[in-house]
Structures are given as structure tokens and as C-alpha cells.
Image (spheres, helix red, strand yellow):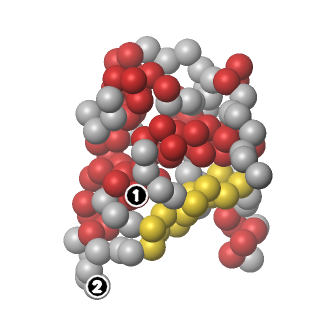
């Protein structure tokens, strides 16, 4: 069964400059324009530059590069997309229904593979 389309009416109106800051040069203008964010995500998604830095640091940790990554607060995909581009098997968990739909859409728009799950990551660990 196909996922329902994301609720585009909930997407924030975001300038080209802000979109470039958030999604960076690894996305085309068309991809950046198609990425969906809500008003919370505009300020809480990890921007591309920071996400790529986090990915780089994770790859430098003892034990070699990570193969599997779980982003338990995935928002609309900044870190999920960065780790997926680096070749990791990524799972992104987002509690909010709209942001989860936007995450799924943004992962597909970026052309990367990641498992997208809607839920409470803290509850899955027993800490919720």
C-alpha cells in the first residue's frame, strides 16, 4: 500500500535562501524547492552543513564508520539524509504525523534510501 501524500497545506512558506541553508548544495534547486517543512521544522531541522559535520564526526569515532544509524528525533530529515548519502542504513523516527509525512517525502525527494517510522523513540527504549 502506498503512503498517502503529505499534507502540503501544512507546509511553511520558506525562502530560497533559507532552503539553501537547510538543504545545501547537494540538492538541486528543484529538490530544495520540493522539500517540505512545517513552522517547527524551519527552526528545528538540522541544516545540511551541520548534519554533514555530524556525519563526518560519527565516521571518525573508534570502531570505524557506522553502518546502521537511527535518528530518534528525525524531524523532516536533515541528519537522516546526510547519513543516507554517506552510505549508512538509516532509520528515522518522528512522532509528529505531519513531520513524519514530510520526512518520508523529503527522503524520496533527496533520492536516498531510509526507513521512516512514525512513533515515540523514547517509548521504544522503555524511557517513554
Does residue 26 appear left or right of residue 5 in this picture? left
Q: CA distance from mark 1 to mark 2?
A: 19 Å
The residue sitting at 26% across, 64% down in the picture is 57
Pointer 1 with pointer 2, Cβ within 8 A = no
Q: Residue furthest bottom?
A: 63
Q: Is residue 23 above or below residue 122?
A: above
**Which of the labelled discs sits on residue 119, or is there none?**
none
Per the image, the residue denoted by label 2 is 63
Q: Is residue 17 above or below residue 56?
A: above
Dot 2: element: loop
Q: Position of residue 2 (x, y in %)?
A: 72, 47
Per the image, the residue denoted by label 1 is 84
Q: Position of residue 55 (x, y in %)?
A: 32, 59
Relative depth, front residue between 6 and 45: 6
The residue sitting at 32% across, 46% down in the picture is 50
Is the C terminus in the top left, top right, bottom left or bottom right quadrant?
Answer: bottom right
Q: Position of residue 71 (x, y in %)?
A: 53, 60
Q: Quadrant of residue 115?
A: bottom right
Q: Is residue 120 visible?
A: yes
Badge 1 local density, few (<14 within 10 Å), some, or many (20+)?
A: many
The earlier-in-sequence mark between 1 and 2 is: 2
Q: Quadrant of residue 61?
A: bottom left
The residue sitting at 56% across, 51% down in the picture is 74
Does residue 95 appear left or right of residue 50 in this picture? right
Q: Nearer the viewer, mark 1 or mark 2?
A: 1
Relative depth, front residue between 98 and 112: 112
Q: Is residue 9 above or below residue 96?
A: above
The residue sitting at 38% across, 39% down in the picture is 47
Dot 1: element: helix
Amino acid at each position: 500500500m502506498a503512503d498517502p501524500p503529505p499534507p502540503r497545506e501544512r507546509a511553511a512558506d520558506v525562502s530560497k535562501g533559507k532552503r539553501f541553508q537547510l538543504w545545501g548544495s547537494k540538492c538541486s534547486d528543484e529538490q530544495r524547492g520540493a522539500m517540505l517543512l512545517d513552522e517547527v521544522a524551519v527552526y528545528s531541522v538540522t541544516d545540511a552543513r551541520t548534519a554533514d559535520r555530524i556525519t563526518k564526526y560519527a565516521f571518525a569515532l573508534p570502531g570505524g564508520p557506522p553502518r546502521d544509524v537511527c535518528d530518534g528525533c528525525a524531524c523532516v530529515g536533515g541528519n537522516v539524509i546526510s547519513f543516507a548519502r554517506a552510505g549508512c542504513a538509516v532509520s528515522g523516527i518522528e512522532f509528529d504525523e505531519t513531520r513524519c509525512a514530510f520526512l518520508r517525502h523529503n527522503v524520496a525527494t533527496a533520492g536516498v534510501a531510509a526507513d521512516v517510522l512514525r512513533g515515540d523513540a523514547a517509548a521504544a527504549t522503555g524511557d517513554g
